[in-house]
Amino acid sequence: MHIKLKDLQETHQRIKPFIHNTPILSSSLINDIVGADIYFKCENFQKMGAFKMRGALNAVLQLSDEQKKNGVATHSSGNFAQALALAAKLQNIKAYIVMPENAPEVKKKAVKGYGGKIIECEANLEARETTLNKVVAETGAKFLHPYNDYQVIEGQGTAAMELIGEHADLDYIIAPVGGGGLLSGTALATYYLSPKTKVIAGEPLGADDAWQSLEKGELIPQTKPKTIADGLLTSLGDKTYPIIRDFVEKIVRVEEDEIIAAMRLIWERMKIIVEPSSAVALAALIKEKKKYQGKKVAIILSGGNVDLGNLPF
Amino acid sequence: MHIKLKDLQETHQRIKPFIHNTPILSSSLINDIVGADIYFKCENFQKMGAFKMRGALNAVLQLSDEQKKNGVATHSSGNFAQALALAAKLQNIKAYIVMPENAPEVKKKAVKGYGGKIIECEANLEARETTLNKVVAETGAKFLHPYNDYQVIEGQGTAAMELIGEHADLDYIIAPVGGGGLLSGTALATYYLSPKTKVIAGEPLGADDAWQSLEKGELIPQTKPKTIADGLLTSLGDKTYPIIRDFVEKIVRVEEDEIIAAMRLIWERMKIIVEPSSAVALAALIKEKKKYQGKKVAIILSGGNVDLGNLPF
């Protein structure tokens, strides 16, 4: 195994001073609806509003002095763009973020707010990669992948470490899966620290490459994702896929209306703001709720960055 | 003074087992924007989603056995209706809630969800009072006023008691004012327990009867309130007015767009759901932010019950 328990423990020590140990909340009303004892790990309260801060920081904190001079670069239109910009800002280094020109203004504004330098490109993967390569060639910045990177995976695993630290006897941990950074980190942390706990993933039916990959036993890329869960559009990578294959019990696919209903339940009953991707994990639990009757289940609420002007309610 | 420190302390002991000691949150981003050190007392996380639970419980818990047999009654289209229904349910007694027939379905549903019996009436104060009197005559239920009641005021004061218990050195506490239950309870708790702390109120310009009452030195009723802050439409009462007159430093009036902007700031930056009435307190702070530079300020976020299908963003 590339990532060892010691790596996870060192990661947590490394990033701890810079992140929030986010609260773990419960709702007796949601417990009653589902019939389980549910603990929500609130990464929507994490710095910049999502768990991605953990992985970005872990990578940035391990740059050499030479690398720090030239800064970091990534292509992302989502939370990793903001996370890398903020992690870089905290270390006083430059962050170059390649974003598709049609990315929502609210996201561009957030990246700029954290001091990131945005380089726009056409809205397709080829243009993103070409532009990124150009930026890296011109600036010498270090490319950091949003999820297919062991340091990033280790960082994302620390949310589950905190969960398990507070609740040693969980039957299940459920996380959403997009590129698989959070899920693979969660699965490894759980394997090492709470081996009796099973890790389940929720995935939108409209972007079910992870489910398909596990079904076929090989990495199937996401081609035309279509889901409101805009943090889960990406394909698994060659580093996240094998970890998920080996350490995740099951991927549960959920429909769009199930995602929106779960999101609304969290907003209305818990009075907290989560993005649709976060609600995918609760939707997966509700979809198979019989399985969880009387069990102790944790859900990782991955983030809370939504465009309030464009809600599905 | 009708309400003594001992009354407040006994109230807190009485209701403590049944309410949440709600969390106190901070946002470094909002602190930076305002230039103050702000502590948000999150009554949006209180049972049934608002501070009203405290006062309703305090009254219900002091009913005689005879009174318990006949139940309680009130007229309210807002959070007190839900609070009384839930408080009664917890004590296994009946709650009769007179609501205007045009009250939002979502509010009627919530009251029914807590087991309250709804009696509909025409949407004017006279019809409300007539209907209530009829209900009381027929059932023998005890009428509880949503705010102009010493037991209710004492209950609402316990939020500030918890605040002061955790932060002894506050320069200011800011609360919204509608009927004045929360504000008068907050002012008395602060007077007894943290006399150096000043209490300020935020009030919508479109429902500024409390401001007008303090200006004119007499109770001026609210006639045609017009504001998005639907928890603040009511007039002060003859019990809340003198406490506010004597123990509140100042009422700051805020415009509708300032309320919405403050609400959005809380939603976007803190990732928590608050109702417009809650945002009135932050809007009041922002309106006079120079005054608060470098100060330690607490804001009572009064509740989080919003209709997600009808947001101002």
Image (cartoon, coloured by chain):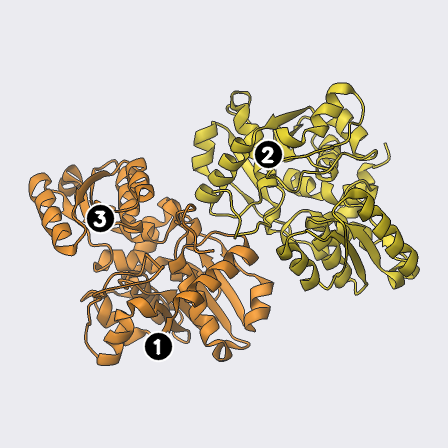
Chain colours: A yellow, B orange
- The amino acid on which the numbered mark 2 sits, given as a three-letter code, is Ala
Q: Nearer the viewer, residue B109 or A257?
A: A257
Kindly state the secondary structure of the residue where label 3 is placed.
Answer: loop
- The amino acid on which the numbered mark 1 sits, given as a three-letter code, is Glu
Q: The residue marked by circle 2 belongs to what chain?
A: A
- The amino acid on which the numbered mark 3 sits, given as a three-letter code, is Gln
Where is residue B119? Give x, y as percent. 18, 41
Residue B240 left/right relative to A34:
left
Q: Are marks 2 and 1 on the same chain?
A: no
Depth check, mark 2 against mark 1: the one in front is 2
**Cα–Cα span, label 1 and label 3:** 32 Å
Residue at 19% x, 48% y is B74
Q: What residue is shown with label 3?
A: B62
| Callout 2–callout 1 Cβ contact below 8 Å | no
Kindly state the secondary structure of the residue where label 2 is placed.
Answer: helix
Q: What residue is shown with label 2?
A: A281
Q: Is residue A14 above or below residue A278?
A: below
**Image quarter for residue A173?**
top right
Where is residue A288? Give x, y as percent. 55, 23
Q: Using the rendered image of the protein, determine whether residue B166 is visible from the camera's viewpoint.
A: no
Residue at 68% x, 51% y is A102
| Callout 1–callout 3 Cβ contact below 8 Å | no
Q: What residue is shown with label 1?
A: B249
Q: The residue marked by circle 3 belongs to what chain?
A: B
Q: Using the rendered image of the protein, determine whether residue B235 is visible from the camera's viewpoint.
A: yes
